[in-house]
């Protein structure tokens, strides 16, 4: 069942696997701004540090991906300069009364996603790494992979959620979108 997002209220953007794709990331942020995104969660694999200039547009919370290993220290220094927060391997925030956990999802962190879902502490768990859009539920927890800005074999995608955690998958390279319940 498809539902329309309530864009009259602030929304949350989710991106992953950016891999330095400045143009597509900028288009994603254009789409975020059109949809009233007030905060972004980034599930890692940023690529070059120059990409951070795009993220300056909307306050963003970041975690590191497997491709960020050599840049972790630089990310920890540079991200606060653009008004963002760097959480390391996983992050935890509350947004509009919803508890959110996110990670990149590589290696042992994949087990952490399952552990966090079983804990039932979270309304939303986000992850990346696979470059494939995915949603599923575990009891009351919505689990989301927004796809990848730098997609392999699929259209680049990211996601926008409203305060009820309804999801819109956004395709920044083509400016088209699908809605999911």
Image: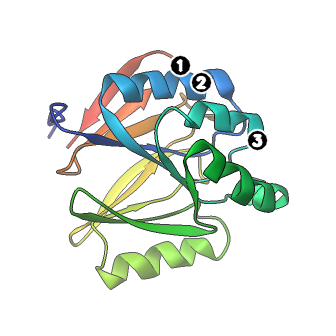
Give the spatial CA distance, label 3 vs label 2: 15 Å
Which tag, 3 or 1, sits closer to the chain's start? 3
- Marks 1, 2: nearer the viewer: 2
Q: Position of residue 133 (x, y in %)?
A: 46, 44
Which tag, 1 or 2, sits closer to the chain's start? 2
Q: Position of residue 91 (x, y in %)?
A: 50, 67
Residues at marks 1 and 2 touching, judged by CB atoms closer than 8 Å: yes
Q: Position of residue 165 (x, y in %)?
A: 23, 51
Residue occupying image coordinates x 45% and y 76%: 114
Scheme of image coloration: rainbow
Residue occupying image coordinates x 39% and y 45%: 39
Local SS, label 2? helix
The residue closer to the viewer here, 148 or 15, is 15
Mark 1 lies on residue = 173
The image quadrant that residue 49 belongs to is top right
Say few, some or many: other residues with alpha carbon within 10 Å of mark 3 (under 14 / 14 to 19 / 20 or more).
some
Q: Position of residue 70 (x, y in %)?
A: 85, 58
Give the spatial CA distance, label 1 vs label 2: 6 Å
Residue occupying image coordinates x 21% and y 69%: 140
Give the spatial CA distance, label 3 vs label 1: 21 Å
Is 79 situated above or below 64? above
The residue closer to the viewer here, 29 or 125, is 29
Mark 2 lies on residue = 24
Mark 3 lies on residue = 49
Residue occupying image coordinates x 65% and y 32%: 53
Numbered label attached to residue 92: none
Local SS, label 1? loop
Local SS, label 3? helix
């Amino acid at each position: 069942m498809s539902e329309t997002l309530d864009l009259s209220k602030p929304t949350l953007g989710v991106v992953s696997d950016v891999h330095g794709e400045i143009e597509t990331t900028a288009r994603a942020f254009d789409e975020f701004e059109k949809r009233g995104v007030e905060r972004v969660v980034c599930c890692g694999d940023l690529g070059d540090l120059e990409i951070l200039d795009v993220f300056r547009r909307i306050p963003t919370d970041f975690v590191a991906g497997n491709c960020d290993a050599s840049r972790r220290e630089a990310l920890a220094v540079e991200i606060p300069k653009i008004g963002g927060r760097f959480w390391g391997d996983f992050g935890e925030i509350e947004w509009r009364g919803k508890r959110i956990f996110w990670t990149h999802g590589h290696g042992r962190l994949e087990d952490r996603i399952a552990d966090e879902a079983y804990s039932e502490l979270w309304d939303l768990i986000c992850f990346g790494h696979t470059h494939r859009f995915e949603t599923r539920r575990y009891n009351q927890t919505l689990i989301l992979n927004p796809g990848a800005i730098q997609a392999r074999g699929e259209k680049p995608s990211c996601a926008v959620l409203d305060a009820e955690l309804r999801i819109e998958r956004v395709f920044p390279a083509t400016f088209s979108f699908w809605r999911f319940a």
